[in-house]
Amino acid sequence: MGSRTALVEDLMERFPHVPREAVFKEDLLRGGVAFDASALSDNESGEVKPKSYFIFSFDHGTLPELGEAALRRPPEEIILTGGPYDLRRTVVSVRVNPASPYRVAANDDGVLGLYLDGKRIADVGVPPMPEYYRHTLSNGKSVMEVAPTIQWGYLIYLTVFRVCQYFGAKEECQYCDINHNWRQHKAAGRPYTGVKDVEEVLEALEIIDRYDTAKASTAYTLTGGAITKTVSGRDEADFYGHYAKAIEERFPGRWIGKVVAQALPRDDVQRFKDYGVQIYHPNYEVWDEYLFKMYCPGKERYVGRDEWHRRILDSADVFGARNVIPNFVAGVEMAEPFGFKTVDEAIASTTEGLRFFMSHGITPRFTTWCPEPTTPLGKANPQGAPLEYHIRLLEAYRQTMEDFGLSSPPGYGPPGPGRAVFSVSSFMDSLPAREPVEA
């Protein structure tokens, strides 16, 4: 095809049941977007909520390679509306790529737009600086550093452990840049707390609760790197769980509490529940047995794929199947050197995994793979997976949910095009626009 526009329009025509908004969103998430200087934020001193780098870089270059976007951060997310495709309101997580065919820039009147192949295709909205970001903790740390919010303010993202104990080429997941992201922010002199103190987290949440008068923040996620030994003398369940316990004691019922952790034994999962966690995300990353071993060597070594899946099913007995929502990284199925060579093969494999979990009442979700350049898979696959894979996955995902009579999972806000706020994939944009039943 002669242009990116032609490719996108061809896919919209071939897959009319996938919302056109999701086609653009997936392309922006998989390939990134460039920003003119006119579209960058003034960091924490401005009127636009800046990108917080809440766990991974989600960029197609290192900070030194991003130019002015490394000094004046782009917005955390953007909203697309209107344009020649009459796009409904679509929230997209920002992944910076200076070489992208998509560019956000202001026109002569100062109005931001999204341009593809030089043509304006949508109006762009940016998140306003929330009042709670304008206040600091008593020790001077920013709320954005301790408790950033994403998904247009819906989710408080608490990365309380900023590195992973799966370390080095023989243990790190091959698509994950959590450890590099930690190193690059420290090298740049940015504040980037490795282990967040529970009292700092509580103080940041108090500020959010005080100034979020509209109660836009509805859920929090506790997450960070895998713990194979201990952190601050605590194993993984106790480390992440003690934050949940403190939050629920201080703010009972204020937010939906979620935790992203490894697939842990049932007794450990019960501890999460006892601490007040409502939703458990034991991410299985990639379905195929061989690819799991190749791309998640630490998880294979310490737990193993089959045991990981058994633990996910066991956790449904603790939380209820609806409240167990494992993530997979959509696109790594096609990553060289070991991935599937055709979209048909990749979709068949991933759908097999979806059917396995959904047949047990468990609804996975996914994050669209961003090939970060410091990771082995990012280096080998700078273009990521084909856009067609991502579009067909949305089709397969919705069909599989319908086959098993499932609805959108709790803790993700409203589903449906024009309504969804989940920003790192389009799975919520592609589901029917029904009101979700939150946990």
Image: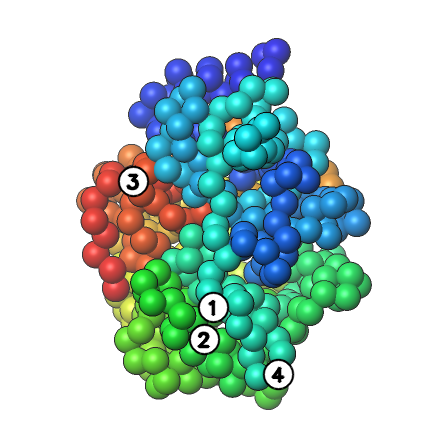
Separation of marks 4 and 2 at Cα, in angstroms: 13 Å
Determine whether label 2 and label 1 are within 8 Å by CB: yes
Left or right: 11 as drawn, with respect to 63: left
Whole-angstrom CA distance, mark 1 to mark 3, is: 29 Å
The residue positioned 73% from the left and 52% from the top of the image is 71
Question: Which of pointers 3 and 2 indicates the residue nearer the eye?
Answer: 2
Mark 3 or 2 closer to N-term?
2
Quarter of image, res 33: top right
Q: Residue at x 61, y 75 (%)?
A: 141
Front one among 377 and 308: 377
What amino acid is found at the position of numbered circle 1 in the picture?
Tyr
Which residue in the protein does label 3 denote? 416
Q: Residue beneath label 1, please?
A: 132
Residue 425 at x, y = what percent?
Answer: 45, 43
Classify residue 160 by image quadrant.
Answer: bottom right
Q: Which residue is mark 2?
A: 207
